[in-house]
Amino acid sequence: MAMKVILTKDVPSLGKHGEVVNVSEGYARNYLFPRGLAIAADKGAMKNVELRQRQEAMRVEKAAQEAKQVAEVLRGKTVTVKAHVGKGTTKLFGAVTAQHIADAIAQQYHVKVDKRKIGLLEPIKSLGDYEVPLHLHHDVNLTLRVEVVPQEASA
């Protein structure tokens, strides 16, 4: 006899958290329920699953919209990052990291970009112009021009 259960945790070769799956009664009663891996798929539990799925879909849609808005603001723009350099050289003291770029974007364009969304493979260690990919959402990507310029010495 088969029964429907809602997985409360990821179960290898069965499904992911929140999925409704068909399993045998014995498997559910003897393995899934005692280990807290699933609950019975009754009407109340199914309503909770549907509600959670709608909320997750709304959250994903909102994140996609925000990413598109940030992409519109930044598309074709150049971000200027000031850094300390040695006298008579283009080599930086330290390096420009994704966090520095995120801070410069926030300061210059008033939009927040998470440093983990900036696809900087390695820190920038000299002056110049760089093309840096931004992965704002799984379907919203763009390339941002980053210009590293010397910071004026404070007297």
Image (spheres, grey):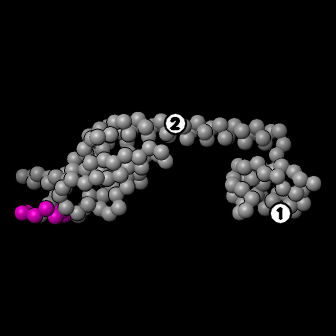
Q: Nearer the viewer, mark 2 or mark 1?
A: 2
Image location (x, y in percent) of residue 115: 38, 52
Residue at numbered disc 2 = 62
User: SS for tag 2?
Assistant: helix
Classify residue 17 as left or right of residue 123.
right
The quarter holding residue 88 reads bottom left
Q: Amino acid at mark 1?
A: Tyr
Q: Is residue 57 visible?
A: yes
The numbered mark at residue 31 is 1
The quarter holding residue 58 reads top right
Q: Is residue 115 visible?
A: no
Q: Mark 2 or mark 1: which comes first in sequence? A: 1
User: SS for tag 1?
Assistant: helix
Image location (x, y in percent) of residue 71: 38, 39
The numbered mark at residue 76 is none
- Residue at x 72% of width, y 42% of height: 49
> Which residue is more in the foreground, 83 or 16?
16
Image location (x, y in percent) of residue 105: 30, 44
Residue 28 vertical placement versus 72 (above, below): below
**Residue 25 sits inside the magenta stretch:** no
State how far apart marks 2 and 1 are (Cα): 38 Å
- Furthest-right residue in this view: 1
Look at the image and give the residue range highlighted in magenta.
87-93
- Residue at x 13% of width, y 62% of height: 90
Q: Residues within 10 Å of mark 2 (few under 14, many from 20)?
A: few
